[in-house]
Amino acid sequence: MDLVAHTLLVVGALFMVLAAVGVVRFGDIYSRLHAAAKGPALGVVLVGAGAAMSIRTVQATVVVILVIVLQLIGGPVGTHLLGRSVYRRIRPPLMGPDELGPVVDAEDVD
Amino acid sequence: MIAIAYLLLSIAAILFVVRLLLGPSVADRIIALDGLLVTILGGVLVNAAWVDSAVSIDTVLVVALLGFVATGVLARYIEQRGG
């Protein structure tokens, strides 16, 4: 049981490292948002499961489940808000065709 | 084995701080701060597993809520102020 819990902790930490490497190495802010949104979500799920399996009390399990639900809801919402603000205000050049730009410009009333 | 998890989280935190220091725009720094906060959350969880007690587990809940609210507020700040 402890071996499984510790393996979950290490794999979750590994996902954090992968997300950090993506945030440092990617050359575009949208790519960095992509890396920063997906890695830590899975990392928190795995590390939380490992910690709950290692502690094995009701309080720890409830709090960890709450944190996982909060992270899985709040992480994508925050990343989406950030991406929306960046696209509407800064708009760094995309790596592909930009079909959203004229639509946003047409409806942007401020 | 838990020491390896500590080491990996330290590497992740260092990489996020690198992006925090050289991020070209404000949004890059917000991304780096958010990732750093999630890394801290993982560190508190790993520490709770290390000492095998649920005393510090409530901190994780506070940090998760703080990360969500902070990202939303900073995104709103970019949208109103620009750049």
Image (spheres, rainbow, N blue to C red):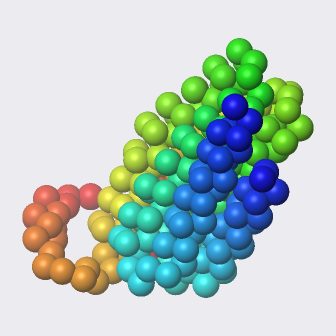
Q: Among all residues in the image, which is located at the extreme right?
A: B51
Looking at the image, is A35 positioned above or below residue B41?
Answer: below
Q: In this view, does A95 lie to the left or right of A64?
A: left
Residue A87 sits in quarter:
bottom left
Position of residue B12 measured from the top left corner of the image (x, y, whole percent): 66, 67
Camera-side residue of A79 and A71: A71
Q: Is residue A23 left or right of residue B51?
A: left
Question: Is residue B38 left or right of B7 when viewed as pictured?
Answer: left
In this orientation, which residue lies closer to the viewer: B48 or A29? B48
Judge whether A84 appears above or below A92 on screen: above
Q: Write down the quadrant of residue B48 in the picture.
A: top right
Q: Which x, y percent locates residue A27?
A: 42, 84
User: Which quadrant, please, contains the C terminus of chain A?
Assistant: bottom left
- In-front residue for pair A82/A53: A53
Q: Can residue A42 be seen in this view?
A: yes
Report x, y in % for residue A37.
Answer: 44, 56
| Residue shown at the point (10%, 71%) measured from the top left | A99
In the image, what residue occupies the spot 30% across and 66% down? A88
